Amino acid sequence: MSIVNSALIELDPATVQTLLTAGEAVLVDVREDDEYAEEHIAGSLLYPMSDFEVDKWPSVTGKKVIISCLGGVRSAAIGNKLISAGHGWVSHMKGGLNAWKDAGLPTITQD
């Protein structure tokens, strides 16, 4: 885990998997519909960056919300927008889906 700015927390894929498996977090994928349909992490929620609105950002009571994208750039951008809007600490997965796959973790792919 590292901190990109004072409130954006980067989590590595193994930590994200541990939190998801324990039921302590939910993963929000900010890629677009077609990218998500092609390949995504099981159980992740889709909230495309193109539809992003701070006041409609999903929250799940009692769980951490972790943001993900393909390589970590979009998720960091969304995280910084949430922080600027007063959301406090925000987590995103460093390296996104690419890092998840590089770590040998499973994805759901379009057949």
Image (cartoon, rainbow, N blue to C red):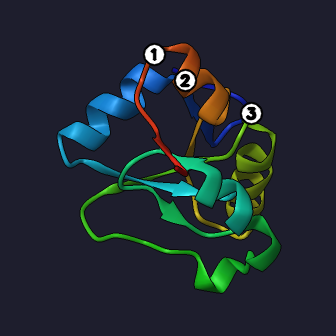
| Identity of the residue drawn at 74% across and 75% down | 52
Q: Give the side of residue 64 with respect to residue 83, left or right.
A: left
Q: Residue furthest front?
A: 111
Q: Nearer the viewer, residue 57 or 110?
A: 110
SS type, badge 3: loop
Q: Give the side of residue 76 with respect to residue 14, left or right.
A: right
Q: Say what amino acid the circle numbered 2 marks.
A: Lys
| Identity of the residue drawn at 61% across and 35% down | 97
Q: Name the residue carrying label 2.
A: 101
Are the residues flagged by discs 2 and 1 in contact, CB closer than 8 Å?
yes
Q: Name the residue carrying label 3.
A: 71
Q: Based on the displayed image, in which of its 4 quarters is residue 29 positioned? A: bottom right
- Dot 3 or dot 2: first in sequence order is 3
Q: Residue furthest top?
A: 103
Q: Name the residue carrying label 1.
A: 104
Q: Position of residue 13 (x, y in %)?
A: 48, 25
| Residue count near mark 1 (Cα–Cα under 10 Å), binned few <14, some 14–19, many ≥20 | few
Q: Based on the displayed image, in which of its 4 quarters is residue 101 positioned? A: top right
Q: Nearer the viewer, mark 3 or mark 2?
A: 2
SS type, badge 1: loop
Q: Position of residue 30 (x, y in %)?
A: 67, 59
Q: Nearer the viewer, residue 49 or 64?
A: 49
| Residue count near mark 3 (Cα–Cα under 10 Å), binned few <14, some 14–19, many ≥20 | some
Q: Position of residue 24 (x, y in %)?
A: 24, 47
